[in-house]
Image: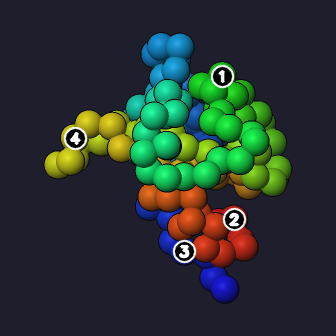
Amino acid sequence: MARAKPCEEFSFADLRLQRTSDSAFDVTTSHTGGWTFSLDADVASRVGSAGWELGPVGVPTAQQWVAALEQEACDLAAPTRLSGPLLKLSHQGLGGWQLYWFEIGGGRVRYDSSPEEAQAGSNFL
């Protein structure tokens, strides 16, 4: 089965990370044309209301996300390093923070609207 197309995917060319709070950080790459993704790892209440089961591992912290992004930028051939929920600030019509399922690995970051969509296939793009 082919993996579902993610909502978005970007590479690590010229990765720039900036922590904006204990739980939030910004990600910018040249692949996104300088567009900044504002992300927040403080998702516990949203994950519960969305009905997402995370198992014993739980929700990754901002520190874990930033570390995985930095490691991935240095080793692009690595398998999936980290996956889990993050809030992404919408810069379009919806506005506000939206809950997505993110995966880091294989030299890419991708996000889907749910963990079920992310697991729809077996190949990491």
Q: Where does label 4 land, which residue? A: 95
Q: From where the camera sits, is residue 28 visible?
A: no
What distance separates the C-alpha of mark 4 from that of mark 2?
Answer: 29 Å
Dot 2 surroundings within 10 Å: few (below 14), some, or many (20 or more)? some
> Which residue shows up at 60% across the image and 25% down it?
62
**How far apart are labels 2 and 3 at the CA level?**
10 Å
Quarter placement of the N terminus: bottom right
| Amino acid carrying mark 4 in the image | Gly
Q: Residues within 10 Å of mark 1 (few under 14, many from 20)?
A: some
Sequence-wise first label, 2 or 1: 1
Specify whether residue 6 is in view.
Answer: yes
Q: Is residue 117 left or right of residue 99?
A: right
Give the residue displayed 54% in from the left and 52% down from the top: 52
Instruction: Give the mark nearer the N terminus: 1 vs 4.
Output: 1
What element does badge 4 sit on? loop
Q: CA distance from mark 1 to mark 3?
A: 28 Å
- Pick whichever of labels 1 and 3 is earlier in the sequence: 3
Task: Identify the element where label 1 is drawn.
Answer: helix
For the C terminus, the quadrant is bottom right
Counting residues from the start of the chain, the first of labels 4 and 2 encountered is 4
Viewer-proximal residue among 76 and 114? 114
Query: Measured along the vertical axis of the image, is residue 85 above or below residue 60?
Result: below
C-alpha separation, residue under disc 1 versus residue under disc 4: 25 Å
Q: Which residue is mark 3?
A: 4
Pointer 1: what residue? 63
Q: Cα distance, mark 2 to mark 1?
A: 23 Å
Residue identifier under label 2: 124
Q: Nearer the viewer, residue 31 or 89?
A: 89
Q: Eyeballing the image, is 71 above or below 13?
A: above
